[in-house]
């Protein structure tokens, strides 16, 4: 096609060409607007995620050490209590009973802190509160199982599994700035159910 033919083609179809160019410009504007909208939405989601991560980390910074300490202390006290339940006290020596009473008081004190933590973290870290509650209850139940040490040890073993799960979950939540996973909640629920079943079975037999 010669230059003259090309010029003639454009001359004869200039309106169509202008229309196509205008449509192309509109399409590019629409694409740019769409990409801008998606970019704004993505930026907003990222901003919300960062704020959520900061909120979760701040929450955990204020209490994660205390939670870990109280879980460890209450189960340690319950474990020592079981060991003391196995001892035979001399009839003229009240020190064993005094020591047992002391550890029961320690359990009561740690229980108050865990129940308070359960209330604080109930909605912020949904799923962990059931674990904190059952750990506190398990140690409390051990206090009354002097006549059934086998059950006391089984309950304590399950409670310590929950403690390990919660410890790891809190560290991961802080590190990632996110909530506990559904798998973590499921594991806690499972071990909590096992402990409650043990306790209920005891009450039925008695």
Image (tube, rainbow, N blue to C red):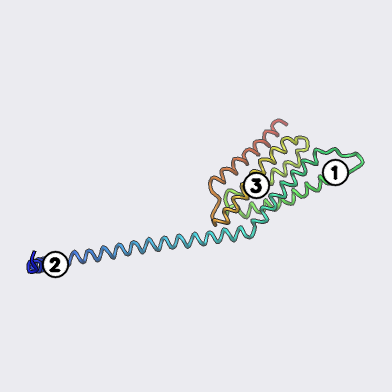
* Label 2 CA crowd tier, 10 Å (few <14, some 14–19, many 20+): few
Q: Quadrant of the N terminus?
A: bottom left
Work out whether 82 lies above or below 2: above
Residue placed furthest toward the top: 205
User: Residue placed at 66% from the left, 56% from the top?
Assistant: 65
Q: Who is closer to the viewer here, 9 or 192?
A: 9
Q: Is residue 123 visible?
A: no
Mark 2 residue element: helix
| Secondary structure type for disc 1 | helix
In terms of secondary structure, where does tag 3 sit?
A: helix
Quadrant holding the C terminus? top right
Name the outermost residue toward the right. Answer: 92
* Residue 54 placement (x, y as % from top left): 55, 61
| CA–CA distance in space, label 3 to label 1 | 28 Å
Residue 22 lies, with reference to residue 187, above or below; the image says below
Q: Nearer the viewer, residue 120 or 59?
A: 59
Which residue is label 2 attached to? 15
Instruction: Please indicate, yes or no, whether residue 174 appears anywhere in the rendered image.
Output: yes
- Residue drawn where x is 80% and y is 41% of the image: 84
Q: Which residue is mark 1?
A: 96
Instruction: Report if the CB atoms under discs 2 and 1 are less than 8 Å apart.
Output: no
Residue at point 67%, 43% (across, down): 159
Q: Which residue is mark 3?
A: 163
């Amino acid at each position: 096609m010669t230059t003259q033919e090309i010029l003639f083609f454009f001359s004869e179809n200039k309106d169509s060409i202008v229309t196509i160019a205008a449509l192309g410009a509109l399409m590019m504007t629409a694409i740019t607007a769409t990409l801008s909208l998606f970019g704004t939405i993505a930026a907003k989601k990222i901003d919300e995620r960062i704020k959520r991560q900061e909120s979760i980390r701040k929450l955990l910074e204020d209490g994660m050490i205390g939670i870990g300490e109280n879980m460890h202390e209450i189960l340690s006290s319950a474990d020592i209590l079981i060991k003391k339940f196995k001892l035979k006290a001399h009839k003229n020596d009240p020190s064993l009973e005094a020591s047992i009473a002391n550890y029961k008081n320690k359990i009561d004190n740690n229980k108050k802190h865990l129940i308070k933590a359960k209330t604080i973290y109930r909605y912020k870290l949904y799923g962990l509160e059931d674990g904190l509650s059952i750990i506190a209850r398990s140690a409390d139940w051990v206090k009354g199982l002097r006549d059934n040490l086998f059950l006391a040890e089984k309950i304590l073993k399950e409670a310590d599994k929950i403690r390990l799960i919660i410890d790891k979950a809190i560290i991961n939540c802080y590190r990632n700035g996110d909530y506990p996973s559904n798998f973590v909640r499921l594991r806690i629920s499972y071990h909590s159910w096992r402990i409650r079943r043990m306790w209920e079975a005891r009450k039925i037999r008695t």
